[in-house]
Structure formats: structure tokens, C-alpha cells
Amino acid sequence: MKCLFFSIVFLLSSLLFAHCFADTNVIDQVCKAYAGDITEPFNSCVAIFKSDPKSVKATTIYALGVTSLEHLIAKGTLINSNILQLLKDPKTLPAVKEALQRCSSSFTLAEKFLKEGFKGYLSKEYEEIYAELETVILDVQPCADGFDREKLTNCNTRFCGITLQYKYGGRWVGSLIPSIRLAN
């Protein structure tokens, strides 16, 4: 679930740069703004965006934001589906089921807020999307702390993103680049 959290962080930060990019090489520009002068996150960012045909065709940060939000909604829905499958598993302990039910409720609400935020993004009402995405972060983060993200999200190969954190100048910098890889 941390991937979902960091995807949201990326979307929020990318909106800050939305007015800066007019060039057709928007992926490089977005990744440069994200990574600064640190090579490894820049290369990862470019590779992630270029792995998605829709992202490659994007000529604006706005178009990349649309693609990211579409995938974020799809992956949040996938996580909730995985949670519901775990709830049906007879091997799942009652205490775990109770926590999973809370997570499912959180992801159901998150999906609603993401869809509202997506509408705001499409109509360029960025304050709307900030509010909706902040709500999503608050709703799903507690669930992220209680479960093996691999089991719930298949984060390593199929979920929404990767976390890039680097110790630099005594503070943690970095966030998430939305991975556009879809589950096959």
C-alpha cells in the first residue's frame, strides 16, 4: 500500500510542475524535475514512464497525470479485489479478517475519492484533486502499516509504483514515480 501512498505523493508533486512543461520530451523533463541531479532515480523514472505506451505518447505533464490517475484508480481497485479474495479465504484468521474488512472499507472510500479527484484533474480544478488525494492518503495508510504489501498488492511487479528514497544532505528526498506497468 505504500506504493499507492507514494503514487499519490507523485501526483501531488507533479501538479506543482504542470505549468513548467511545454516541450514534447515531457518524460525527461518530469523525471529531471523529480530526480534533480541524481542519476539513479532519473533513469528509473524514465524507464517506468517509457514502459507504458500511453505515457510515451503524452506530450504534457497533464497527459502524464491523466495516465497516472487512471492507473492509480485501477490499482486501488485491484488491491481491494485482492483484499476481498483474502476475506473469502477460509485460512484467513478472524482477527486478520477484521483488519481486512477495515482495509476494504478504506479502499472503497479511496476509490470514490480518487474518482472525484480524477474529475477535478480533468476539469483542471487542482484544489479539488489535492483535497481528494489527501483524503485517500489518510484512508489507506493505516492499512499499509498492518499487512504484507506483497500479498495484498503484488507491488513488486504489478502495482502502482516504486519508492525511491535517498539520503541526501541529512534529509530524505525522493518519492514515487508512478509505475505504469499493468498486470498481465
Image (cartoon, rainbow, N blue to C red):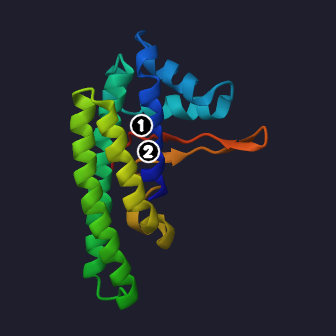
Q: Residue at x 45, y 61 (%)?
A: 141
Q: Between residue 107 and residue 3, name the one nearer to us.
A: 107
**Is the N terminus in the top left, top right, bottom left or bottom right quadrant?**
bottom left
Residue 52 locus on image (x, y percent):
36, 33
Q: Between residue 40 and residue 29, name the one nearer to us.
A: 29
**Residue 1 vertical placement versus 172 (above, below):** below
Q: Which residue is mark 1?
A: 11
Q: Residue at x 64, y 45 (%)?
A: 165
Q: Are marks 1 and 2 in contact (CB under 8 Å)?
A: yes
**Residue 172 vertical placement versus 123 (above, below):** below
The answer to which quarter of the image holds residue 66 is top left
Instruction: Determine whether, in the image, residue 128 is placed left or right of residue 20.
Output: left
Residue 126 visible in the picture: yes
- Kindly state the secondary structure of the residue where label 1 is placed: helix
**Residue 99 vertical placement versus 62 (above, below):** below
Label 2 is placed on what type of residue? Ser
Label 1 is placed on what type of residue? Leu
Q: Residue at x 41, y 33 (%)?
A: 51
Q: Residue at x 41, y 22 (%)?
A: 18
- Kindly state the secondary structure of the residue where label 2 is placed: helix
Query: Number of marks in the image?
Result: 2
Residue 13 locus on image (x, y percent):
48, 34
Residue 23 locus on image (x, y percent):
43, 9
In the image, which disc is placed on residue 7? 2
